[in-house]
Image (cartoon, coloured by chain):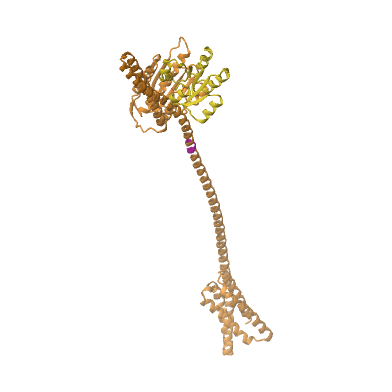
Chain colours: A orange, B yellow
Amino acid sequence: MLAEPFICFFLLRRVRRLLLNTNALDPWDQPIKILFYGIIALFAAEVIFHLDFITKWIWHALLLGIIYIAFIKKEFIVARPLMFAVLPFAILSFAADLFKVISLQQYKIVDNYLQIATIFSIVWMAAMIIVSNRQQKALQREHEKTKQEEEQKKWMEARKEELEKIVGERTAELRSQKEQVESTLAELKATQTQLIQSEKMASLGELTAGIAHEIQNPLNFVNNFSEVNAELIEEMKEEIDKGNFEEAKLIANDIKENQEKINHHGKRADAIVKGMLQHSRSSSGTKEPTDINALVDEYLRLAYHGLRAKDKSFNATMKTDFDNKIGTINIVPQDIGRVILNLFTNAFYAVTEKKKQTSNGYEPTVAVSTKSVKLPSGGLGVLISVKDNGNGISGKVLDKIFQPFFTTKPTGQGTGLGLSLSYDIIKAHNGELKVNTRENDGTEFTIHLPV
Amino acid sequence: MKILVVDDEKDMETLFQQRFRKEIREHQVEFAFAFSGEDALRYLEQLNHEAVLILSDINMPGMSGLELLRHIKEKYENPPPVVMMITAYGDTENYNQAMKLGADEFLTKPVDFNLLKEKLKLKN
């Protein structure tokens, strides 16, 4: 049969293709190639030397061998439909040749049938190959589609990875920026602490100078008057010995006066030290419900009588306007008392100064009022106002009045800590201390305290 | 000897009068008091620099002791009165400035009256 070499060749090619598509070619590539060359060589030998009486058996063996291998090797499963297509033809062709050899007589009997069968087998082969081809093509399309999808998936994964990388980079960038901002903030906070510290140190410098002056002056009197008193006592003794009791009495009076001065200046030094300690220390006082009207009234009297005791000529009109609806509020009474006392002292000082400068028609007046109010934050609050009709505060010094150690009073009369301390106390109560002043007209300090 | 004491601390008057009561009694010294630099200048003008010795505080409201010192040394030349500075601020800056302006002595508070008397040559 002349067709067999071609069928062999065709079959091998198809098998190779199929194996290639299913990625199973690798171990079979070499043998298949050798078979190709073998087929070509055998075919050439057959045609040139007319050896078909030998080669036809080789073709049969080859064809059936390929089919056999296809059926026993797992990786050839894709080629099996093809084998089914070829198998009837291969068997018939082999059978025909076999008959010819065994008995020509019998072959002639079956020849017709064989020829018909062969035709059928060829038709079968063609049909099967077409079907198989179609299937193969569909499979290949499917395969390509999957491959494409896989590629797309791979591409998408690559994009995803890329995007994730970018996102990661951005995140890292943001994080580093955040860290930078945080470290800057920390630095700023440290600088602020340092500034506050150096501010404290600066005020400590002022404090030392203040201590020098404020302590040395009273100390001068304490030391010297006590020494004088020691001498006076000696003199008094001498006078008594001489019998000059009148003289002795006069000396005793001097001693008493000096003693009062020692006491006064000792207390002055004490007050200075205490004031400074209070200023540097944060209050340890606890809040308690306090009748703010009673507290204000008490400190108003304290301030007034304190000044009257010092300066007999001092006098001022006091006006009070208390809101009885307030009731009690939660404050540290000593601290708020100190603030109010300070405001009163300042107010009385201001009106006294103005009275010294003005001759007639000026009536020194200090007015105090309390009021229950609504705070801007919405909650309830208390407003305390201390108002004087003194000279007011000049614009030059207005922004300095809450600074520690700033004072307009002459030496010995003010430490410059009063308003600064008051400001801190009100702030610690979450309140506000404000000033409203008009030069030559007077000053009003207002305290807002939340209830 | 007439001494003008300038200090814004009012108790200085009593203190000096008591510290120098013997010397005052024996008419060795006579004191006048001024409570500010301005007061001191007014006094000197009125009495035609009757005082031969001026003891001045430095830190006073208004005119400071150093300003007063400068005024005195500029105005009263022939012969200039002796000016001693008495201050609670004993730092070198104050000292140097006082000396530059022609202060004759520089004493610190609390005042050592024995030392002061020595300086005034009242002590024998």
Image position of A131 (left or right of A257) = right
Count the numbered circles shown.
Answer: 0
Indicate yes or no whether the magenta region holds residue A180. Answer: no
- In-front residue for pair A406/B121: B121
Is residue A93 at least partly visible in the picture? no
Residue, far front:
B124
A385 over A185 or under it: above or below: above
Q: Residue at x 54, y 78 (%)?
A: A69
Report x, y in % for residue B97.
Answer: 54, 27
Residue A47 image point, x, y percent: 67, 83
Residue at the image point whose x is 55% and y is 58% from the top: A153
Quadrant the C terminus of chain A occupies: top left
Q: Is residue A307 left or right of residue A60?
A: left
Region in magenta: A192-196
Relative vertical location of residue A68 with respect to residue A270 in this rendering, above or below: below
User: Could you say which is closer to the camera, residue B22 or residue A421?
Assistant: B22
- Looking at the image, which is closer to me, A133 or A184? A184
Overall secondary structure of the magenta section: helix
Residue at the extreme top of the image, as rendered: A360
Quarter of the image with the N terminus of chain A is bottom right
Where residue A49 appears, x then y in whole percent?
68, 86
Choose top left, top right, bottom left or bottom right for residue A301. Answer: top left
Residue B56 in the image: state x and y as whole percent.
49, 21
Asked whether residue A437 is in view, the answer is: yes
Question: Which residue shows up at 30% across the image and 15% down it?
Answer: A243
